Image (cartoon, helix red, strand yellow):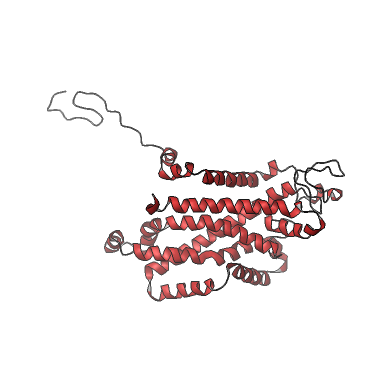
Amino acid sequence: MSSSEPVRPGETPDETPVDIPKPPSLAARFFDSDLWYSFTRSPITVASGLVVLLFFLGALLAPWIAPYNPFNPASLILMDGFTPPMGEAISGNTYLLGTDDQGRDVFSAILYGARISLFVGFCAVLFAMVLGISLGLLAGYKGGWVDGVIMRVADVQLSFPAILVALLIFGVARATLPRSFQEEMVIYVLIIAIGLSDWVQYARTVRGTTMVEKNKEYVQAARVIGIHPLLIMLRHVLPNVMGPVLVIATIGLALAIIAEATLSFLGVGVPPTTPSLGTLIRIGNDFLFSGEWWITLFPGLALVLLALSVNLLGDWLRDALNPKLR
């Protein structure tokens, strides 16, 4: 090639093709990130992640893993009630964690109950995140009387324990719904009650971060070129406030699961026909002092193990996303 001819892309003057490396995939970048390195360097975090993964897989695959369907009345054997763990029942069946008063397999009931607890917890956290982030962005970006009204409502709600707020919302919803729809809507009422009792922490965190971000140069430049405030909040401010929100959501998942279990234990949550972990503990509590300890012990241990593992993951995520601790 003469020196007067232009060089084509991908070639050097001596006509040797240049190998342009391919960008790494998303999975490769994740496994090469500081977040994954921090996760693998903490044995407690790895163990907590495995426990949470087992719970998720067990709940998701419960219809195939559970040896019995505890919520199918046709499959229940009342004579097998109060069978101790690994004991042989009257029917000849052996139950790993024993049975309850109705002959339901406790191990199968825990798997099915974890599905309801995780579903309610996830949906409640998602609902609280959407509501809290929206109100926090609005309060922090607009300021003025909008900020004052939203934050005063948040302060009033913080004056009451979250479980009392959830009980109040749950009671009002049950009183306004028609009696024929109460059994069908009870799970969704639980989600709304728990979500409305937990949105404040998201709103306060997002508001504080938004008040800092809205005064930075990139937000000022977006205002100058005429971008709508809603687009500024969603495209520019929101991605920069999601770090603390993810940490709160991880810890909030454990709190939402415990809140659902508390409401179910008090008898205002999921009905006994489709019990969650809290309902199983309440059912077993009626027979705790008569010697059938396994009915409440194993669901209680499952709830404690799940909540503790999620909390430990939240603590790790908080430290991993904190630039001061790197």
From the viewer's perspective, is 317 left or right of 54? left
Closest to the observer, 48 or 222: 48
Closest to the observer, 27 or 72: 27
* Residue appearing at x 40%, y 65% in the figure: 208
**x then y, percent, for residue 271:** 72, 60
Q: Quadrant of the N terminus?
A: top left
Q: Is residue 185 visible?
A: no
* Residue appearing at x 43%, y 55% in the figure: 243
Q: Is residue 3 visible?
A: yes
From the viewer's perspective, is 121 left or right of 184? left
**x then y, percent, for residue 9:** 24, 32
* Residue appearing at x 63%, y 46% in the figure: 60
**x then y, percent, for residue 93:** 82, 41
**x then y, percent, for residue 209:** 39, 62
Specify the quadrant of the image occupied by residue 121. bottom right
Specify the quadrant of the image occupied by residue 25. top left
Callout count: 0
* Residue appearing at x 48%, y 55% in the figure: 247
141 over 39 or under it: above or below = below
150 over 224 or under it: above or below = below
From the viewer's perspective, is 126 left or right of 94? left
From the viewer's perspective, is 33 left or right of 248? left
